[in-house]
Image (spheres, rainbow, N blue to C red):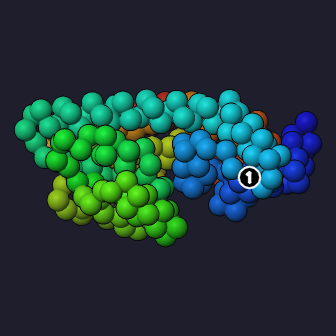
């Protein structure tokens, strides 16, 4: 079954913009997830757009969009609470991809003064985030290259963020040490009393479900959610 699905993805599926992007950038890449978030079917010919619509409507990608909604709700609450406490709202996303979920909330909450630093290890994601921020008319956002697992570079971030965000990252990496390094870097980076907003999922999770449904493996294994919990606040 999976071999037949993969064959379809590599042939007829290439008429779909989303599937073509997946083959180019990776089906678990930030660019693919941003395309799924945007949820606007595109393709070559009407047939390609129909294939793209079906692709975007798959159960896994629907789950990814629900995750985005939930993430934005938690982030919105953290922003409002930080502002209510009279503290500056400084956002840090350590693996933002194009950063749509963060940038949309910044625009939505424009009545609250805030700044944001979006980091990613891929130059194309940094550039995509920069373009999206310009499209949304945001001037208070900085984008830069950065390693989400580098304790030293995270700990050195100034000014200290009051809200840190890690979305769809830790659950993709099976090794505990990089996750531990990243979280300890964030513990040193975030202002005391600040917030950490992060996603976790048991296997396979929304992304794993999406990739499995297409017969496509993720580039990394999934880290069980109980492994992540051991690095929580002590």
- Decide if residue 131 is on the left or right side of residue 85: right
| Residue at the spot 17% in from the left edge and 37% down from the top edge | 82
The image quarter containing residue 20 is bottom right
| Residue at the spot 20% in from the left edge and 49% down from the top edge | 114
Mark 1 residue element? loop
| Residue at the spot 59% in from the left edge and 49% down from the top edge | 35
Q: Quadrant of the N terminus?
A: top right
Badge 1 density bin: few <14, some 14–19, many ≥20, Cα 10 Å = many
- Decide if residue 76 is on the left or right side of residue 53: left
> x and y percent of residue 231 in the render?
37, 39
- Decide if residue 163 is on the left or right side of residue 229: left
The image quarter containing residue 81 is top left
> x and y percent of residue 207 in the render?
62, 39
* Nearer-the-camera pick, 95 or 188: 95
> x and y percent of residue 198 in the render?
40, 39
Query: Would you say residue 86 is visible in this rendering?
Result: yes
* Nearer-the-camera pick, 210 or 154: 210
Q: In which quarter of the image is the C terminus?
A: top left
* For residue 167, above or below residue 160: above
Q: Name the residue under label 1.
A: 43
Query: Would you say residue 209 is visible in this rendering?
Result: no
* For residue 221, above or below residue 205: below
- Decide if residue 118 is on the left or right side of residue 21: left
The image quarter containing residue 59 is top right
Identity of the residue furthest to the front in this view:
46
| Residue at the spot 67% in from the left edge and 39% down from the top edge | 56
Identity of the residue furthest to the left in this view:
86
* Nearer-the-camera pick, 176 or 212: 212
> x and y percent of residue 223 in the render?
56, 40
């Amino acid at each position: 079954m999976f071999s037949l699905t993969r064959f379809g993805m590599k042939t007829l599926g290439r008429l779909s913009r989303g599937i073509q992007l997946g083959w180019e950038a990776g089906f678990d890449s930030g660019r693919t997830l941003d395309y799924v978030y945007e949820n606007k079917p595109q393709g070559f010919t009407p047939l390609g757009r129909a294939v793209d619509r079906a692709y975007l409507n798959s159960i896994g990608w629907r789950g990814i969009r629900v995750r985005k909604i939930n993430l934005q709700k938690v982030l919105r609450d953290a922003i409002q609470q930080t502002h209510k406490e009279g503290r500056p709202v400084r956002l840090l996303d350590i693996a933002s991809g194009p950063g749509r979920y963060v940038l949309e909330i910044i625009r939505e909450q424009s009545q609250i003064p805030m700044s944001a630093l979006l980091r990613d290890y891929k130059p194309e994601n940094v550039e995509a985030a920069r373009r999206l921020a310009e499209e949304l008319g945001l001037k208070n956002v900085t984008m830069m290259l950065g390693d989400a697992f580098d304790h030293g570079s995270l700990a050195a971030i100034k000014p200290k963020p009051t809200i840190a965000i890690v979305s769809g990252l830790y659950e993709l990496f099976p090794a505990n040490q990089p996750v531990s390094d990243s979280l300890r870097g964030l513990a040193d980076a975030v202002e005391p009393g600040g917030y950490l907003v992060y996603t976790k999922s048991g296997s396979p999770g929304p992304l794993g479900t999406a990739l499995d449904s297409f017969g496509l493996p993720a580039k990394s294994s999934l880290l069980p959610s109980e492994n992540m919990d051991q690095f929580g606040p002590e």
